[in-house]
Image (tube, rainbow, N blue to C red):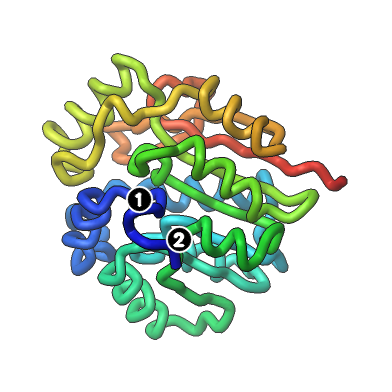
């Protein structure tokens, strides 16, 4: 693994999320926002890329919400990677309570894995991670190296708009308490145009961009055409 001095990670961010490890799988706890949004994200990934029989990689897997979801939907193999050992411990412990045999977790950074297994995954996901790393453009380049020819990459992040500041930080963190206070830093939010530029440089083509909106009265999320706050981006690598 690369040294901490060179890996594309923020140790303060890793520590912040590691401190939440014991609450990760509590749907009514501090991570309830992730639990509420997770079925929608998995449905989107399945609809756009197909999960069954695919080799999948979940980058920045945290406690394993997405990784377990991919495995439960019939992926041939799922690898979840993260740099927070406490989160991986929680992910592995939770997986022992399932019948899933197609799921593995590793403490490894994406660059090291890309050197080990270039083009090794038919489906790569990286959800709510880009806005937490020092160099998101570099991470997108690395993700592109991990996607197999003809494969898919699905990203989720937040747009850098005043609306996103009001809803994702002021609303979600301080008013509704859907995620812990201090989770997001506005200056790290990413405009879709920036993300598309980074992806094209990595040999990826944008296939679809969809917004995610929170419905406070219903207490759930839905897909929309409004990408001004949370959004999902589906990219494909050419078959050549």
Instruction: Give the number of the disc on residue 156.
Output: none
**Residue situated in front as seen by the camera: 108 or 63:** 108
222 in relation to 18, above or below: above
Look at 62% across and 38% down and name the residue there: 234
Look at 20% across and 64% down and name the residue there: 23
Residue 71 placement, left or right of 85 = right
Look at the numbered discs 1 and 2 and tell me whether their residues touch, using CB distance below 8 Å.
yes
Check the image and name the residue furthest to the top: 162
Residue 11 place in picture, x, y as percent:
25, 53
Residue 118 placement, left or right of 9 = right
**Residue situated in front as seen by the camera: 123 or 144:** 144
The part of the image, by quadrant, that contains residue 26 is bottom left
In the rendered structure, which disc, 1 or 2, sits on the residue that comes first in sequence? 1
The part of the image, by quadrant, that contains residue 216 is top left
Disc 1/disc 2 C-alpha distance (Å): 9 Å
Q: Helix or strand or loop: what does disc 1 sit on? A: loop
Which quarter of the image is occupied by the N terminus? Answer: bottom left
Residue count near mark 1 (Cα–Cα under 10 Å), binned few <14, some 14–19, many ≥20 = some
Residue 7 placement, left or right of 208 = left
Residue 74 place in picture, x, y as percent:
64, 69
Q: Helix or strand or loop: what does disc 2 sit on? A: loop
Residue 45 place in picture, x, y as percent:
59, 49
62 in relation to 230, above or below: below
Check the image and name the residue furthest to the right: 240
Look at 19% across and 53% down and name the residue there: 16
Residue 130 placement, left or right of 100 = left
Residue count near mark 2 (Cα–Cα under 10 Å), binned few <14, some 14–19, many ≥20 = many
Instruction: Give the number of the disc on residue 9.
Output: 1
Residue on which the image places disc 2: 109
Look at 71% across and 38% down and name the residue there: 203
Residue 194 place in picture, x, y as percent:
51, 23
């Amino acid at each position: 693994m690369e040294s901490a001095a060179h890996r594309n990670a923020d140790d303060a961010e890793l520590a912040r999320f590691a401190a939440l490890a014991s609450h990760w799988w509590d749907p009514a706890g501090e991570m309830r926002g992730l639990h509420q949004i997770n079925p929608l994200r998995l449905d989107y990934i399945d609809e756009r890329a197909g999960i069954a029989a695919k080799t999948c990689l979940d980058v920045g897997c945290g406690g394993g919400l997405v990784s377990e979801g991919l495995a439960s939907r019939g992926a041939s193999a799922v690898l979840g990677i993260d740099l927070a050992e406490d989160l991986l411990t929680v992910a592995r412990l939770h997986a022992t309570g399932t019948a899933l045999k197609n799921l593995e977790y590793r403490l490894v950074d994406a660059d090291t894995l890309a050197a080990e297994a270039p083009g090794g995954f038919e489906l790569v996901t990286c959800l709510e991670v880009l806005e937490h790393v020092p160099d998101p453009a570099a991470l997108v380049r690395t993700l592109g190296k991990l996607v197999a020819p003809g494969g898919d990459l699905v990203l989720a992040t937040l747009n850098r708009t005043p609306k996103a500041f009001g809803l994702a930080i002021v609303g979600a963190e301080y008013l509704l308490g859907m995620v812990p206070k201090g989770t997001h830093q506005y200056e790290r939010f990413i405009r879709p145009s920036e993300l598309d530029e980074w992806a094209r440089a990595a040999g990826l083509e944008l296939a679809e961009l969809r917004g995610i909106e929170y419905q406070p009265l219903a207490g759930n999320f839905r897909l929309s055409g409004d990408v001004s706050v949370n959004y999902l981006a589906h990219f494909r690598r050419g078959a050549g």
